[in-house]
Amino acid sequence: MSDSKPGSGAGPRPDADVAVQTCPVSGEGGPPPVERPTVTDWRTDWDHLGPRWRDDPFPIWDKLREGPIARTERFEGAWLPTRYEDVKAIAYDTDNFTSRRVVLRHRKFEDPPLPAPPLTSDPPDHKEHKRVLLPFFTPEEVGKLEPLARRICNALIDGFIADHRCDAAQQYARHIPVRIIAYMLGVPIRDSHLFIRWIHEILEIGNVDDEINRNGIKAMRDYFRHHIALRKEGRTEADPDGPEPDLIRAMMDGSLNGVPFEENHVLGTLNLLMVAGIDTTWSAIGASILHLGRHPDDRRRLIEQPELMPTAIEELLRAYSPVTMAREVRKDVELRGCPMKKGEMVLLSFPAANRDPAVFPDADKVVLDRRENRHVAFGLGIHRCVGSNLARMELRVAIEEWLKRIPDYRVDGEVRWSDGSVRGPRILPVAFA
Ligand code: HEM
């Protein structure tokens, strides 16, 4: 990778870029309520899009771990492993399980589904689809982005600290990853509110409304088409201090076996980076601020012993893992006596695996100095998260800057969690002196 400049201390002007924008969709009380039949038996009729799962999934997983792999006839037939070993076995088994569909929908309306490489790629192509991204996410490259992350966090805090209260999800957590990924992609940071809206449409309400999902994806693809066209004319709206090449340019120049990536592939990866880079980390930052707000002992301990930060970050990622992905059964296969039929879906709950007491003693407790912590918040096997270094840095910096300036705060109002396969607080009112 090039000598991208964030590490040099240059970078976007914080005040120009970090004004808090109102999201027309998720900024006003969360997604519209969706009617879903009530779950009668979680073992045979589970539904990860219902309110019980959204608000408190942990007891559900505890119960399910005791029995065979849970099944539902919703989503045209799907399975739900909740034990660590089962999630691991499926994540590694790319022969029997394909990633071509990674989100559960009530109807598999699209065949073939739109690709989002490398997430939706299988071997052997997966490796090359991933390789093009890796140089952007090394610890060294991510380290160069740290000053930018700190500036963003502080400018956000400047925006609400005098009010002695804020919505930590809406006014803080959600703005950090979106600005950084926009900078890396090479698109204007001022467009952040658009990305937030599309992600909400694709990942939350779009899970149950095909049309909203399609419109969100289309809007995002059109947006990237425009930025690709600009580059073809030798122009760009990227931050002048941003990385060179940026992620859009790297994807335009990418190839497999000497054949340039098709437009569908390039757009799919760019959409994925936007979605995967934002919602996930926003959720992790929000859940961590929520935990530290509700557990003053942990908060004080982290302030007094900052050397705990590395293990604390891993523990918060484990306990509040935001990401659940799915697989499609490629051919009939049996796992733990459960007959999984070709074409059925499997929901890979990394969050449930991370609460499995067979692997994590006191799995439901947050232990800031937990030593053995082989959590799977970033997945397992070939699809393990590309952005884990970036996510960890953003989460650490967001917590550090928050605690420096708001060491004493409390959750002050009703918390609202997201719907869908990425779980995190979307409304998080806090008050501070
Ligand atoms: C706390 C934040 C994050 C969490 C918990 C997370 C979690 C995950 C998980 C569980 C997977 C595996 C999916 C599967 O097996 O199907 C994954 C894959 C991926 N993530 Fe992340 N992610 C986070 C942040 C990011 C960021 C910041 C980026 C990039 C900007 C990113 C980009 C990706 C990509 C491109 C993949 C696909 C990798 C592949 O298929 O080989 N993620 N992530």
Image (cartoon, rainbow, N blue to C red):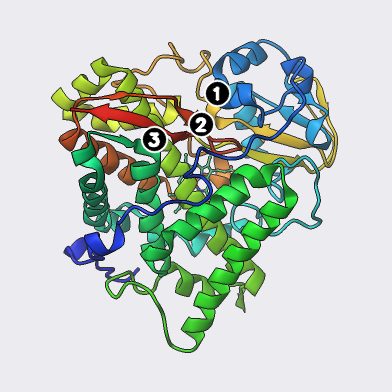
Residue 402, image x, y percentages:
23, 37
Q: Secondary structure at mark 2?
A: strand
The residue furthest left is: 304
Q: Amino acid at mark 3?
A: Gly
Q: Amino acid at mark 1?
A: Asp
Q: Tell me the tag on residue 286.
A: 3
- Which residue is found at the position 51% from the left and 31% from the top? 417
Above or below 242: residue 171: above
Check disc 1: other Cα within 10 Å, few if <14, some if 14-19, many if 20+.
Answer: some
Check disc 2: other Cα within 10 Å, few if <14, some if 14-19, many if 20+.
Answer: many
> Which quadrant is the C terminus positioned in?
top left
The answer to whether residue 370 of the structure is visible from this angle is: no
45, 412: nearer the viewer: 412
For the image, the number of numbered tags is 3
**Whole-number angstrom distance, CA of label 3 to CA of label 1:** 15 Å
Q: Tell me the tag on residue 417.
A: 2
